[in-house]
Amino acid sequence: MKELHNLFESTSKAKKSLPIIRRFSQYFYPYIKEIPVIIGLIIINAITQAIAPFLTGWSIDNLIIKSNLSRLAGMLFLLAIVHLIGFFSNRILIARVGIIMQRILTKLRQEIIIKLQTLSLSFFDNSKAGDLMSRLLSDINTLNQLFSPILPQVIGSFFGLLVSAIFMLSINLQLGLFTNLMIPIMLLVTTLFARLARAKFRITRQTISQLSSKFAEDIHNIQEVQAFNRVQLNIQQFRKLNADNRNANIQATAITSAFLPTIDLLNTLALAIVLACGGFLIYTNNMTVGAITAFLFYVQQFFQPIQIISHFYTQAQSALAGLERIFLLLDQPVQLQDATNATTMPAIQGKVQFEDVSFEYKPGQKILNKVTFNAQPGQAIALVGATGAGKTTIISLLSRFYDVTNGTVKIDDIDIRKVTQASLRRQIGIVSQDTVIFSCSVAENIAFGNPQATIAEIEAAAKIANIHDFILTLPQGYNTQLGEHGVNLSKGQQQLISIARAVLIDPRILILDEATSNIDSQTENLVQQAIANLLQGRTSFIIAHRLTTVSNADKVLVIQQGQIIEQGTHTELMNQRGVYANLYSLQLANNIKTDLNTILL
């Protein structure tokens, strides 16, 4: 009963795969002009395959048996020409179809990359990098393995099967019809095996995705893994995922491994039928030796295309599972889009307004609740509060990484939803705690937001960021290649490069998210000087847990549970003796205590 249920379930899934196949077929439309050439090559290849057994059988009956050896050499030469034509037509066919498939797969990869670049941060909040990499590489690779080498053979085999069937029927109608009865049997066997394999291959695609995600996560966080003694536990988790992937592949292989021997058995059965029936027909003088020889060749050729097509159909189950995952990714809605009438944000002065802004990452879970404040051009606005209070969410809404649930965010009295995201972010600079360093040169890292910048502009930005002198000490200076995630730089040096990157795009609004955390005091002085240089003439938003770093801000916003509970200058808030004053006094006392302990030790 369970197997019957699985079979019905597989049938339902097979019906669902038809839209996937139709959608994938649309990628072939730009190459319609290639179809006549491909069809011509297919026909030539099919005819050369089918005519060789016919000529062989004719030669046996009319040349060898009749001892007409003088013409046999010419027939051998003709057979050689036929095989050469078939060889070259087949190679050209494989090459033409292979080129088309590589272009299609390249387009698919580009669509995935473009899609990933346009998806909002909310999508990545709930996705794993390893899974996305699996779709881009592993799932695409299943299509590459299937279509590039196998598809041309399948196309040629289909027409070769048709031509072989015609020649078989022309040699002996009864024996040809009887042999062709094997086709429905083989199609039934193929369908049954493919339906069982489809579900198993879908599981293999899921398990390899989980395996890739786990591997990418462990490698990216290897320092934390070792620091917290998670090595053995992570190995055990990886072993389990690896075992799940192994078991899924074993189950899929168990099905496919039984398929080809079944086809071989049917092939052997067909040969036995031909030999038995053909021998009887020769005995009764209703068939010649040459004809039965040609017929045996045709049976071999007849079943070879069926095996290729069947193998393709079985392998296609894995490819369809991968294609299904790819299209699911491509169909992800872009939640954050430019309005149809969006305009380019003009050069801004830096006035920022939050008007009754509320926001929810998930429906019913408010992160911000009716947040209202103003920032004038050139002002420094400090955001303080406990972790999770909503500080980072505010700056994310300002950069329009997310759209507000309610309310309005305006810059220079313009609703940021009415301008293009690119023109908005071009005028906003971000220096965050989690500095991103790319695996490229120092110069390319600084020019990340302005790739057209000259080396003179890059150096000028580095000088403002107090990192120029250090860069000159590197082996190749600005051309020095940095390791992944900046592993060959200190946290402070990474931060200074990040500041130089912000300087180079010359933003009118600057966001500093814990920009001086996790660095030593000497480097912090360099960072603070660089930030002071960067802040000049710009509206800035500063997130800091150390309140001593924001005492000079023009306005301090105290955030608690998604609401602004206090706002004003440092002096005004200290005089109010409220939440901010208590936090500041507590931090100051802790700092003094820490300094005393350091001196005593």
Image: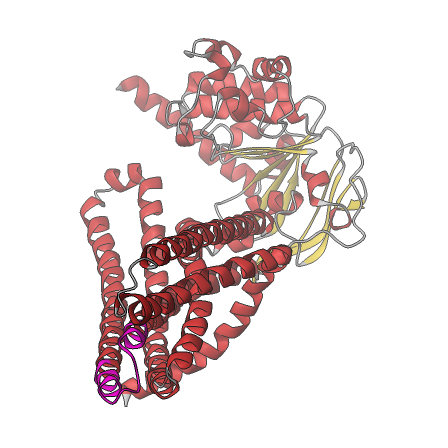
Asked whether, in this view, residue 376 is left or right of residue 227, the answer is right
Q: Quadrant of the C terminus?
A: top left
Q: Position of residue 488 (x, y in %)?
A: 37, 23
Q: Nearer the viewer, residue 27 or 587?
A: 27
| Position of 283 relative to 295 (above/below) | below
* Residue 570 in view here: yes
Asked whether, in this view, residue 102 is left or right of residue 220, the answer is right
Q: Position of residue 162 (x, y in %)?
A: 45, 73
Q: Nearer the viewer, residue 473 or 150?
A: 150
Q: Nearer the viewer, residue 499 or 335?
A: 335
Q: Position of residue 280 (x, y in %)?
A: 22, 88
Q: Position of residue 192 (x, y in %)?
A: 34, 80
Asked whether, in this view, residue 390 is left or right of residue 68, the answer is right
| Position of 505 relative to 20 (above/below) | above
Number of numbered tags placed on the structure image: 0
Identity of the residue drawn at 43% across and 9% down: 473
* Residue 322 in view here: no
Scheme of image coloration: secondary structure
| Position of 564 relative to 314 (above/below) | above
61 within the magenta span? no
Q: Quadrant of the N terminus?
A: bottom left
Identity of the residue drawn at 37% across and 72% down: 198
Q: Main secondary structure of the magenta part?
A: helix
Identity of the residue drawn at 57% across and 66% down: 23
Quarter where residue 312 is shown: bottom left
Identity of the residue drawn at 54% across and 49% down: 103
Q: Nearer the viewer, residue 59 or 568?
A: 59
Q: Give the magenta-colored segment's residue range.
A: 275-295
